[in-house]
Image: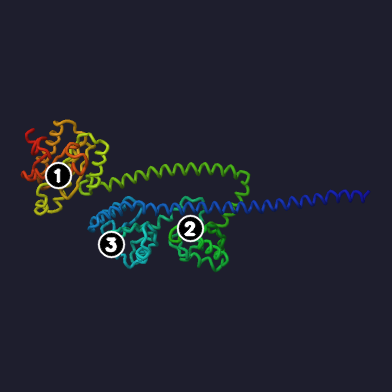
Amino acid sequence: MEERNKSAIISWIVPAIIFLLVVFVMMFNFSTKSSAAAEDTVSRNLVKSVQAYAEDFLDRLQALGKISGPFRVLLERNAELDDDKAADIADILYSCTEAYKVVLCDAEGVGVDQLGRQVTLGSEKYFQSIIQYDVASCVYAEGETGNSEEKPAVVVAEPVAEGEETNYLLLYYSMDRFANLLSESEFDATAFMVLMDADGNIMGKSGFDASNFLQGDNLFDTIEPENAEEIRTIKSRIDNSSRGTTSVTVGGEECTLVYVPLGVNQWEIVVGVSQAYVDRQVDQQWRDAKNMMIYLVAAIFIFIFMVIVINIISKIRSNENKKELEDKADTDLLTGLTNKLATERKIKEYMAKHPDSQSMLFVLDVDNFKKINDTMGHAFGDEVLRSLGQQITAIFRASDIIGRIGGDEFMIFLKGIGDEESVRKEARKVENFFKNFQAGEYVKYAATASIGVAIFPQEGSDFESLYKAADQGLYKAKKRGKNQLAFYRDEWGGAGAQEQK
């Protein structure tokens, strides 16, 4: 009986032990796999977060290059720029971007910044890199020394071709903005972020300054003495432009390094997260394994929603910025009117859309403008042109096109002028304007103008022929003694439409 009981016990215990061992092994395997999966998930989440910071930082730099493009075209079309105009263009670009300094210089590094200050960059290492590689909209490390006002920065370089020569438009992005990337991160207070090159040289940092990892100028040199094998892994991945995570220890401080290539100049963004934080995240992943799919689905919907919202906002802002830049590119800086190219373009667009709509084109020259400059000074001459632009705009409709097309030459295009009486009325309006026009704040000067008029489409069905007709009217007005208006065809009213007054 006792033997039978022992046999029965053994027959139950052995299968039970085997079962328990199997369960134990399965649980151990499940635990190991789950732990590895949780670590992998945390690692991928960390990489994703750092990738977002890298993209944010890179987007800000690339935005500088995109915004500077139209200014490069403007500079290439205006090859002969003095320092004042160059400084004005630099100042406009400065006000449109996050750059803390904008410089326009030649291939020798001599130029001006947005404040009109002379700069000499020829001896700077980063400027030599720009000249050497001869690339557009690329990013370089900025390492100026000897000037306490300078900040650690990156420089976006935009070559400006002027004939056989190449000038450079440089936009300086302060490295101080790099520190803002961690300000609202999900990491704990001991996290730090580093921007470094492929050799481990630190170019910018933020976060936990007291970290042992940030006590040197080269991150590799700081880590390698205690982590020889790990540093080889990190260097190998960086050489292959791979992203990843590696746990290391420096001076008793345990940390997981997350590294992501920035995608330019072999730069890397490295985030150091305390091992305690990583362990908590792994534990959280293990406890929440059952809810992982729910969280993942929710995260995907939130991510898609955020991407859609961000894209919509970015599109709106991009359109606003584009419209602002187009308006500035179309504007004559002195008078505030449209410039020659924009004026011609707008008139041609109207002609194409309204080929049968009777309209008027005025071409006018300020009489004896050279004498005004010679006797009153160029500053007063500019004031005459500025006043003319401001005052003549007030007497026409907002839909009419008014532009400055030369030094003292202006063009006015009046849309939809229906009958002959309206034509003569508008001609008298322009002519009478100059009988009362005065410029100057302290010294009043009564400037006059010679005006030529042509009617669209009767006297020119395209811009070139219409302008030629108006120019012939202008020639008539000057030949008759200036200070008057002449139509291309005198049957519209003769010189200045004086018969209709």
Label 3 residue SS: loop
Q: Is residue 299 left or right of residue 64?
A: right
Whichever of labels 1 and 2 marks the residue nearer the N terminus, that label is 2
Task: Give the x, y percent position of residue 339.
Answer: 23, 47
Task: Give the x, y percent position of residue 213.
Answer: 51, 63
Looking at the rendered structure, the kind of residue marked 1 is Asp
Looking at the rendered structure, the kind of residue marked 2 is Pro
What's the CA distance linking mark 1 and mark 2? 61 Å
The residue where tag 2 is placed is: 261
- Please report contact status of discs 3 and 2: CB closer than 8 Å, yes or no: no
Label 1 residue SS: helix
Location of residue 274 (image quadrant): bottom right
- Please report contact status of discs 3 and 1: CB closer than 8 Å, yes or no: no
Task: Give the x, y percent position of residue 445.
Answer: 10, 46
Q: Nearer the viewer, residue 489 or 291?
A: 489
The residue where tag 1 is placed is: 471
Please tell me the numbered disc located at residue 164.
3
| Quarter containing the C terminus | top left
Q: Residue at x 63, y 47 (%)?
A: 287
Q: Nearer the viewer, residue 44 or 355?
A: 355
